[in-house]
Image: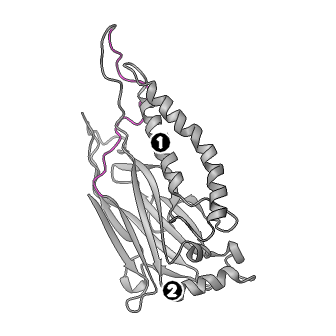
Amino acid sequence: MLELVKAFDRPENASAYFELYGETSPLVDEDFAELLPSGAPADGDQASPPQSNLHIYEYWWTLGVTSALQKRFREEAESPHLLHGHGDQATGAQVDVYFPTDAGWRVKELVATLKYLSPIHIQQTFGEKLAKEWALLSPLLSAAGGAAGLLAPGAPVAVDRASKVLTAVAGLKLESAPQTDDLKWWVTKVTPDEGFGSRQGVRWTVPARCFVEIGTRVTASVAVSFIPSPEQGEGAPQPAYKTSAIRGSVKLFPDGDGHHRIPGEHEGRDFIALDITPKTTAR
């Protein structure tokens, strides 16, 4: 089931909102560590090609701001002297999404995106960059097709997994805004600050100019697969997948010399939380 959670930066006259959206009952890839199938077919056996249990899910966040806040981002992007970078390098927002590591499951991050709607104001710049990225992605798509063609009885399960990953990554990259001189965004892998436990985080650094060129509603995503991670010594024959939350938060830098956070302090929480209950793919 696809579900959504939302928060605002202020209890009244909110200038921004933040949403986290995605599948709440994903399937776990329980053979992700298997490179070769457990058994090969006998001569003449027309068994089906090996299929991995890999399922790839996209989790989105959306950050919406008012036109008044967009004006402040525009001023920040055009200012030559700012604390959080300057001009086209000025940071507009920092978005963190954290996945749990202590619920008997965790994720494998595959690719992150920043969405845009074509044609964008700087479409020519985007078009030139996308053409170069397409030249790089074309071999990936060819490799994915070639890998799929190798699927035969007794072939490594890893071939099927590679085909799925290459296809998903190439497809999502084509939907994502490229990094250009006008729009330099990036992601990093992070862990939460002290006091928030052990979690796998992905952080988007979004330039102020993004809220000018893309608009007052910015959406991004990360594609992941789910894998089992039971604690050694528990003794359970099958992993027990507990319900746990994907958490998200935003820091906005509309003035260059400070920030405000979503969820806001008035909400009494540090993150918005999307509860996830993974399911087994045991056959």
Return the x and y of residue 150 as percentages of the image width and height: 45, 24
Return the x and y of residue 52 as percentages of the image width and height: 36, 33
The residue that appears at 37% across and 82% down in the rendered structure is 268
Q: Residue furthest top?
A: 43
Image height of 25 relative to 163, above or below: below
User: In the image, 46: left or right of 114?
Assistant: left
Look at label 2 and name its amino acid.
Ser
Q: Mark 1 = which residue?
A: 167
Using the rendered view, name the quadrant where residue 231 is placed.
top left
The residue range painted magenta reads 24-42
Please name the predominant secondary structure of the magenta segment in the image. Answer: loop
Q: Which disc, if any, is residue 67?
A: 2
Return the x and y of residue 172 as percentages of the image width and height: 49, 52
- Asked whether 28 falls inside the magenta stretch, the response is yes
Q: Is residue 256 visible?
A: no
User: In the image, 167: left or right of 239?
Assistant: right
Of callouts 2 and 1, which one flags the residue occurring earlier in the amino acid sequence? 2
Image height of 61 relative to 72, above or below: above
Q: CA distance from mark 2 to mark 1?
A: 37 Å
The residue that appears at 50% across and 56% down in the rendered structure is 175
